Image (cartoon, grey):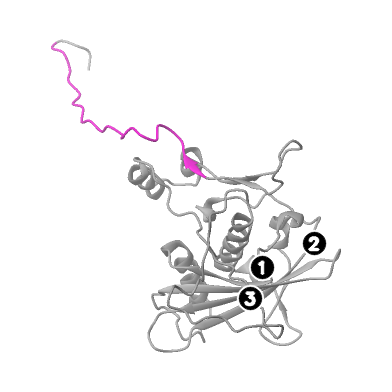
Amino acid sequence: MLGATALDVIGEALRPPFTSFALVFTDRYALGLAERLLAEDPSARLRGRILSVLTVYVTATADGAGPMDLRLAFAADARDGGWPELVVRELSVRQDARIVDLLRTLSPGDEPGEEVETLIASPPLRGLVGLVINAILYATSADADPVPGDPRGDDAPPPRRRRGGAIPPTDGIFRLPGKIDVTSLKQLKRVRRGASDVQAIRRCMVRGHWRRAGRSWKDASPRWIKPYWRGPSAAAIVEREYRLSCAPGADT
């Protein structure tokens, strides 16, 4: 659902929940984007492999009124006993910049001093970065569903105490939205596969977007308007077979 949400916000709305955190994706949409990204690199060890999990390590650095630097480290793992495939990119986010425009800027390459237009030339990478930004926006939105407790589980060892003797706080985890649950999803997917252009799917689906907080709202966090399929959500599409008949003596 976040992959079908438009990034119609400015950099001021992008406020990471923590300075350093990780996003874990196990759905086929995110894994498919990562597989397409690795397929573009002939030297990638996991090129052509089916991935099992994609972990994105996000580090945010800000110096007050200046731009915020986001470091995204994509770790793709096929659970084959080898090291995950690592792709690192950095973004500089200004408060007045449109997020859509940021995806068209130059990004640092793998070598020092190298700049490559990967976010333009690589649609899978652009899709992954957009997915990560939408996940950050959702985690800090008014609709976020934080789960208290240690993300490592109930059996995790206690965290180390700080020098002053205080126990560091437990941040918990955020549950991101899942699938679009409608009755006519299979039929609409069939229309999408059989369409000759993207106009059919655009007529069937309304993309998600972010609603800015109103002046009278107590919570100034952006609100997520989730994508949905047009038409009745609880009624199944009825398919019938019709036979064309001609009356005797009628003009054929």
- Toward the viewer: 100 or 41? 100
Is the residue marked by circle 1 packed among few (<14), some (14-19), or many (20+) residues within 10 Å? few
Of helix, strand and loop, which one carries label 2?
loop
Checking the image for residue 140, the label placed there is none
The residue to which callout 3 is attached is 168
Which span is picked out in magenta?
227-248
Q: Which quadrant of the rendered structure holds the C terminus?
A: top left
- 251 relative to 124, above or below: above
Residue 233 inside the magenta-drawn segment: yes
Name the residue at the right extreme.
65
For residue 94, side relative to residue 227 (left or right): right
Is the residue marked by circle 2 packed among few (<14), some (14-19), or many (20+) residues within 10 Å? some
The residue to which callout 2 is attached is 94
At which x and y percent is residue 77? 45, 79
Name the residue at the front extreme.
165
**Disc nearest the viewer among 3 and 2:** 3
- Toward the viewer: 37 or 20? 20
Callout 2 amino acid: Arg
- Toward the viewer: 188 or 148? 148
